[in-house]
Image (cartoon, rainbow, N blue to C red):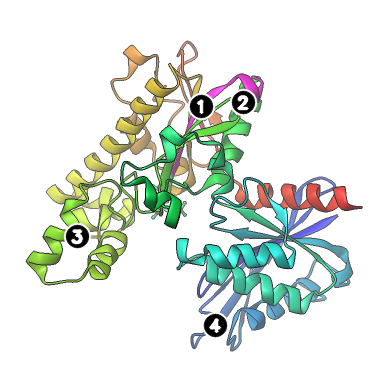
Amino acid sequence: MKVLVINCGSSSLKYQVLDMEDESLLAKGLVERIGIPGSILCHEKTGMEKYNLEAPMADHKDAISHVLDALLDKDHGVLKSMDEIGAVGHRVVHAGEKYAYSVLLSQDVIDALTECTDLAPLHNPPNLLGISACKELMPDTFMVGVFDTAFHQTMEPESYIYAIPYEYYEKYKIRRYGFHGTSHKYVAERAAAILGKPVDDFKVITCHLGNGASITAVKNGKSINTSMGFTPLEGLVMGTRSGDLDPAILQFIAEKENMDVFKVTNILNKKSGIYGISGISNDLRDIEKAVLEGNDRALIAVKVFAHRVKSYIGSYMAEMNGVDAIVFTAGIGENDIGMRAQILENMENLGVELDLELNNIRGIETVISKPDSKVKVLLIPTNEELMIARDTNRIVSELK
Ligand code: AMP
């Protein structure tokens, strides 16, 4: 079966087509500036040059219809007819407490996801727009939802309950949900496979360090704790998000700067993190360049980022009574050699010994710890689209 994977943002859309016979990638692409002048689709058939199409795309339906045209194009396409697509897998950010697994997108499920919109006001609406556009354009094709929050639904209350009046959990479902679940699950399973360990007897800490960053404790294939919380704002320092801080700071800034809570929260989401500390950029490559040029605030940003990740690793090692492995993934985790070294510096007494030569690598699945390191360290490029395609293929194959 061929599966189309769709990941919709508010003004962008990523897609891939995979042939699930051998899990090969047939084509992928990105549409940007949906609903904004200058809409552009960048399509890439595996093994061929990228091809760009600039055309007005007023909404997600317009964008997806151009994607389908590109997939059917006689030169750049990978399909003779849309009937070849057996199912569409949609990335959906938030499923609240409703779904711990991927599910077929029936109208009931879509209604339940719509109810979750107030938990993810920025992310779920574009995801839902993508689903309704695909349903209109491909009314007879199966659609599956794969949720960022699902993998973390195995957490116990001690990990997900906040120490605020319990009625807020009961009334409003305020709790830790966690995100990036598809990525954490993928790299945890890959790590077990690479090390030849059974997933159900394997303790691993997965560090998804990208512009958004989170870290998860995975015990026997299940997420038992994760750093992102009710929203993706909690936890690690990120490109523009603050991560953990004293909640009293909100009121303090609001009073000092004469702002309301929405504005302060916006600052914590969009103007903080690496960008906020350095004042330069949200991209660690720019920050590290500035460090080399002697910029002190850039150096502080790098140190704060590394320190936060290390603190979480230590906490999760305690929570799981030691670990078999630590995995690095996403933009920074896969590419930033110096950051990985800084995070794992001085952890020999905890059994973590990074091999600085093996660590000198980017973007390739590799064990980067010393051969006798008790805790193995791995670099594993994430592949959320493959996970979405696998779940979609499994669910739809079971229907037949
Ligand atoms: P992601 O959100 O996973 O796409 O990661 C994007 C982030 O990865 C960028 O903002 C950079 O901070 C970081 N990144 C990507 N490539 C490198 C690199 N070669 N060295 C350091 N950081 C990188």
Label 4 CB less than 8 angstroms from ligand 1: no
- Write down the residue under mark 1: 204
Residue 323, given in percent of the width and then of the height, sits at 47, 20
Considering only order in the chain, which callout, 2 or 1, is on the residue closer to the N terminus? 2
Q: Nearer the viewer, residue 126 or 329?
A: 126
Measured Cα–Cα span from mark 3 to mark 2: 40 Å
Q: Quadrant of residue 342 in the image?
A: top left
- Please identify, in this view, whether the residue under mark 3 or under mark 1 is nearer the observer: 1
Would residue 381 be found to the left or right of residue 323 on screen? right
Q: Quadrant of residue 8?
A: bottom right
Magenta range is: 197-208
Amino acid type at image mark 1: Val
Q: Secondary structure at mark 2?
A: helix
**Residue 282, x across and y down, in percent:** 31, 58
Query: Which of the two discs, 2 and 4, sits closer to the camera?
Result: 2
Q: Nearer the viewer, mark 4 or mark 1?
A: 1
- Residue drawn at x 62%, y 26% is 192
Distance between the Cα atoms at labels 3 and 1? 34 Å
Identify the residue at horizontal 52%, vertical 84% (top origin). 35
Q: Is residue 338 above or below residue 18?
A: above
Choose the circle earlier in sequence order: 4 or 1: 4
Q: Is residue 266 visible?
A: yes
Determine whether, in the image, residue 34 is placed left or right of residue 6. left
User: What's the mark number on residue 39?
Assistant: 4
Q: Are marks 1 and 2 in contact (CB under 8 Å)?
A: yes
Q: Specify the label residue 192 is tagged with.
A: 2
